[in-house]
Amino acid sequence: MLAKRLTISMMLASMFAAVGSTQPVVGFETGDELAKLVTIYRDNYGVPHVVGETEVATFFGYGYAQAEDHLERMMVQYRDAQGRRAEVEGFGALGDGYLHFIPYEYRWDGDYLQRLLRTKRAVVENKARIDPSVYEILDGFARGVNYFIAQHRKEVPAWIDGITAEDIEALERSQYLRFYSIHDALKKMSGETWSFPDFGSNQWAIAPEKSANGRIIHVEHTHMPWANRFQNYEAHLTTPGKLDAAGISWFGSPFFLMGFNDRITWSATWNEPNMSDVYEEKINPENSLQYLYDGQWRDIRVESEAFQVKGPNGQEAVTLPLYYTHHGPIVKFEKGSHRAWSVKLPNFDGVNYSLGLYGLMKSGNLDEFKASVARQLMPRWSLLFSDSKNIFWVHNGNVARRDESFDWFKPVPGWTHETEWGPYFQFANYPQITNPNSKFLQNCNNPYWVTTRNSGLKPLVPAPYYLSYPVKANAGEESLNPRGERVFQVLTQDRKLTLEEMTDLGWDTYMLPADVIVPMLLDAAKTHHAIDGTPAILSALEKLRTWNKRSSADSVATTYIYYWAKAYEELFTKQKYERFVSYDRGKIDIHSKAEQDMAWHALEHAVAAIEKKFGKAEVPWGQINVVARGGEFPMDGTSVEMFGVLHPDEGPEDENGKIHSNDGWGHLMIVMESDPLKPAPKQIWSLLPYGESEHPASPHFNDQAKLHSQRKAKRFWFTPSEILDHTESVWGDKDRLGRMTSAGRRGE
C-alpha cells in the first residue's frame, strides 16, 4: 500500500511539474479583463495574498493562484463532482459495484454515486436559485482557473478542460452529499461491514479573563490526510472596504472553512449530528419498479446517465440506470427478498452551499456569524467563534424532527408516513454557548455537553436522536476523548495562560495512556526483573522512568511505548488495549498480578520487535516517524487512535519499520485577537504540514515540512505593511495594494 501511494505521489509530482513554474507570469495576453483588476502577492512561504479592485476580481485571482499551485488535484475534484473521473481513470472510477468506499480518502467513491446524488445536475436545474452575488464570485473564480489553463495550455495535461460557476457549486455540494451525508446514512445499514475511519480536529479558545495578556486566544487543528482531497490550501483575500479574510480551503473551493477576517476568527471540527437516514423499502413482487407506501404501490422514479469511460480502445459509452423513491436515491436492491434501501439527505435538491461558507467569511461580529449559520446551508460542523471580546461555540447540524417511537440509529420503515421527517430544528435549538463562566471553550470531536466545564448543555436536548449515536441522559466528562481530556487538564487550571502556553498546547504530544502504562511496567519490574529482566529490558525501564510522556522526536521511550502498544494489541486484542486510551483508564488495577504479567509480556515482545527491525533496542522516535517531502524530516507526533495525542503525525509503516507520515493534523492556526482597549492588532501564526505548492522544484514544496519537524509555526502576514515587507513575488500590478490602502485611508 505504501509503495502504491508513493508511486502515485511521484506520478502526481511529475504531472504537477509539467504545469509550470511557480514564478509570477505578468501579462494578460489571453484576454480576461478581470486579470487587470487583481494582484497576487506571494509571501516568503508562498502564501498568496490576493488583492482585487472588486470581490469578483479577488476571487478570480484566487482561482489563478490555486491553479498555479494545485491545478491537477483541483481538476480531479471538479471531475469527481461532475461524475466524470472515469473519462480519465477508466472503469474503476465508476465505483466498485457503483458504491465504493475508500478509507484513506474518507469517502464514498465513484462517478455513479455522484450522478445518483445528482451532484451537478441539481445545480444546473436550480441555477436561478443561487444567490446572484455568490454566483458572480463563483464565476470569477472559475475564470481565474480557466485563465491559468489558457496561459499554460501547452504544459497542462490534455484531459484538463475548463470549469464553470456550476462546477464549483457542485463541488461544494458534493463535499456534503457524497462525504458527510451519504456517509452518515450508509453506516446505519445493518449487516454491512464497511470500516468507517475516525475523523478529527481540535479547537479551543480562552476568554480575556483567562488570558495572561487579557487578549482572546483561539487555536485550531484540522486532522486530515495530507495527500487527498482534504489537503488544505492557505490564502488571504482582500478587496479594500469589502473583504479582508484569510484561512484554508480544500482544493477547488474559493471559500475558507476556517479562518479569520479583520474582525472575527472561526474554526470548525467534525461533529456527528443525526442528519441522514436509510429507509427500508418493500418492493412489489409483481413489479420490481414499485415500492409500498401507506398501503399503495408507488412507482420508482427511473433516470439514466450516460458515462464516457476510458478503455483500451479509447472512450467507451456506458449508460446506467438511477433509481429513486420519494425519500431519495436507492443505494441497494435485494431482489430475492423484494427489498431496497433508499437514503434521505438534508438539502438534497438544494444549492447555495457556497453562500453558507461565504457568509462566514463576510461576518463582522457575533450576530452576523450566528445569522449566517442560521441559514442552515452547512449541514454540519462544530463552529468556534472569537472576536476581541467574545468566545462562542455552536453544534451546527441540519437535524430534522422525527417520531421518537422509531429507532433512528438504524434503517427505518419506508412504507409508512410515520417515518417522514418534520421540519429541521432551528438555530435557536442548537446546543451553543456564549462567554461561559469557565472562561474557555473547546471541542476535539467531543459531545457538545463537554464543550466546557459545567456547560449546562443536556445530552438528550434538543432530542434523544439529535446525535448519530445513542447517549445517556446523565452523561458527563467521561464522554471526553483523550484529546478533549488533555485540553481540559490544561484549560481548567485556576490560573491565566500565556500565549506561549497556548502555543505549546497546539503542539502538545502528551500521551495520556502512559499515565497508566508506565507506572504499571515500573511496578511489574519489582517482581519480574530479577527473573527475566534482560539488560535491554532494564534499559527500556530506565528510559520510561525518566520520560516526560511526550512523543518527542528525540525520545527513545516513545518508541518503546509505541511498540509496547502494538505488542499488547497483538497478544491480548485491540479491545483490551483500548482500556488505556479510554477516560476510565484509571480504573485499571496496575498492581494486579494478571495486569502486570500481560504488561511485562508485551514489553518483552516490544523490545524484541525493535531489535529485530532496527538492529538495536534504543531508537529515537524521530528516526522511525518521518515525513518524506523533498527530503526526510523527523516527526514528533504519533497515532491519535492509539494514544489520543492532540498533535498527531502518522501514516503507513513500511517493511523496515519506518512510518511515513501522511496523516494527522492538516493545519495549525493560532490567533491572538486584537486588544479592544488599546491599539494592539490581531496576530496570527499558522502552518501547513506539507507546504503551499505541489511542485517539487518550488521552495514552498517542503519549507513548512521543515518547520513542522522543528515544532515551529510561521507568522501569517495580514496587514498591508506586513504583506509588502514579506513579499517574495508579485503577479500583476505590484503597486495595487499600497495604492488601494492609501486611497481607503484618505476616504475614511
Image (cartoon, grey):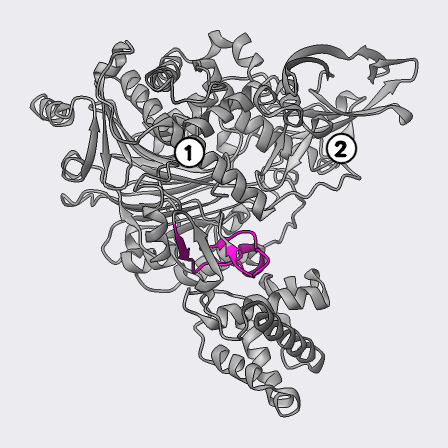
Q: In the visual, does 298 lie left or right of 509?
A: right
Report crowding for label 1: few under 14, some 14 to 19, many 20 or more residues within 10 A (C-alpha): many
**Residue 500's spot in the image, x, y percent?**
28, 59
> On the image, numbered disc 1 is attached to which residue?
257
Magenta stretch, residue numbers: 631-659
Name the mark nearer the viewer: 2 or 1.
Answer: 1
Overall secondary structure of the magenta stretch?
loop
Label 2, label 1: how far apart the Cα atoms are: 31 Å
* Residue sitting at x 38%, y 14%: 139
Which residue is more in the foreground, 211 or 103?
103
Q: Amino acid at mark 2?
A: Pro
User: Is 645 rendered above or below residue 558?
Assistant: above
User: Residue 655: within the magenta?
Assistant: yes
Which residue is more in the foreground, 387 or 425?
387
For numbered disc 1, what is the local secondary structure? loop
Q: In the visual, does 661 lie left or right of 478?
A: left
> On the image, numbered disc 2 is attached to which residue?
411
